[in-house]
């Protein structure tokens, strides 16, 4: 009797564990072709990297602003806003969400504006790296937008 109960519980546990193993995969379960989703994941990576760089650049700009360099108020603000938008875009696109196109259109535009603002200070290594990250993210978002089902 106890062996039968143990065997039933064991079988149930194995049955529950097998589907759960698919959730442990590095990438979400495929809804469409893997190559299609790869564009979303590439975009999510670029957005995440850009958000980190923009946060670092905003901190850098705040230090420059404290030193009296008032021209860095614009880049401080654009970097903070861009980081917030990129973070949201990374989250939505990583799960191939239905609003990926909407957030990526905004993200691409934000990255273009932030990159242009930081590029005005291209002699500053941090600002140049931020502009580069923004332009890479803008490109990744625009590439992903080409693969949205219309």
Image (cartoon, rainbow, N blue to C red):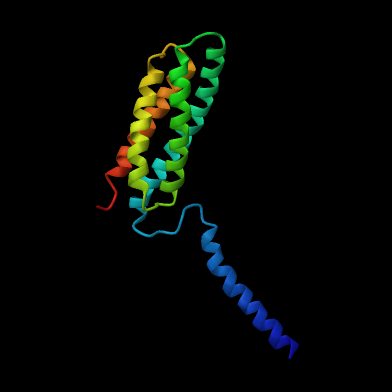
The residue located at (43%, 19%) in the rendering is 74
Q: Compared to 72, does 145 lie above or below?
A: below
Q: Position of residue 36 (x, y in %)?
A: 33, 51
Q: Compared to 13, does 97 lie above or below?
A: above
Can you tell which quarter of the image residue 145 is in? top left
The residue located at (46%, 13%) in the rendering is 124
Looking at the rendered structure, the number of numbered marks drawn on it comes to 0
Q: Tell which residue pokes out farthest to the bottom in this image.
A: 1
Can you tell which quarter of the image residue 135 is in? top left
Q: Position of residue 85 (x, y in %)?
A: 43, 37
Q: Compared to 67, does 145 lie above or below?
A: below
The residue located at (35%, 41%) in the rendering is 104
**Is 22 displayed left or right of 119 in the figure?**
right
Q: Position of residue 69 (x, y in %)?
A: 50, 9
Q: Compared to 65, does 112 lie above or below?
A: below
Residue situated in front as seen by the camera: 26 or 133:
133
Q: Position of residue 94 (x, y in %)?
A: 44, 48
The residue located at (37%, 51%) in the rendering is 37
Residue situated in front as seen by the camera: 2 or 118:
118
Residue situated in front as seen by the camera: 43 or 80:
80
Q: Tell which residue pokes out farthest to the right in this image.
A: 2
Q: Tell which residue pokes out farthest to the top in this image.
A: 68
Q: Specify the quadrant that holds the N terminus.
A: bottom right
């Amino acid at each position: 009797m106890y062996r039968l109960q143990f065997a039933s519980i064991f079988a149930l546990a194995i049955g529950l564990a097998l589907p759960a193993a698919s959730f442990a995969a590095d990438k979400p379960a495929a809804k469409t072709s893997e190559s299609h989703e790869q564009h979303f994941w590439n975009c999510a990576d670029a957005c995440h990297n850009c958000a980190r760089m923009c946060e670092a650049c905003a901190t850098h700009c705040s230090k420059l602003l404290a030193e009296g360099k008032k021209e860095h108020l614009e880049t401080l603000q654009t970097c903070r806003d861009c980081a917030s938008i990129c973070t949201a875009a990374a989250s939505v696109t990583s799960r191939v969400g239905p609003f990926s196109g909407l957030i990526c259109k905004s993200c691409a535009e934000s990255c273009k504006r932030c990159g242009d603002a930081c590029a005005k200070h291209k002699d500053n290594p941090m600002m140049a790296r931020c502009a580069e990250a923004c332009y890479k993210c803008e490109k990744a978002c625009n590439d992903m937008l080409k693969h949205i089902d219309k």
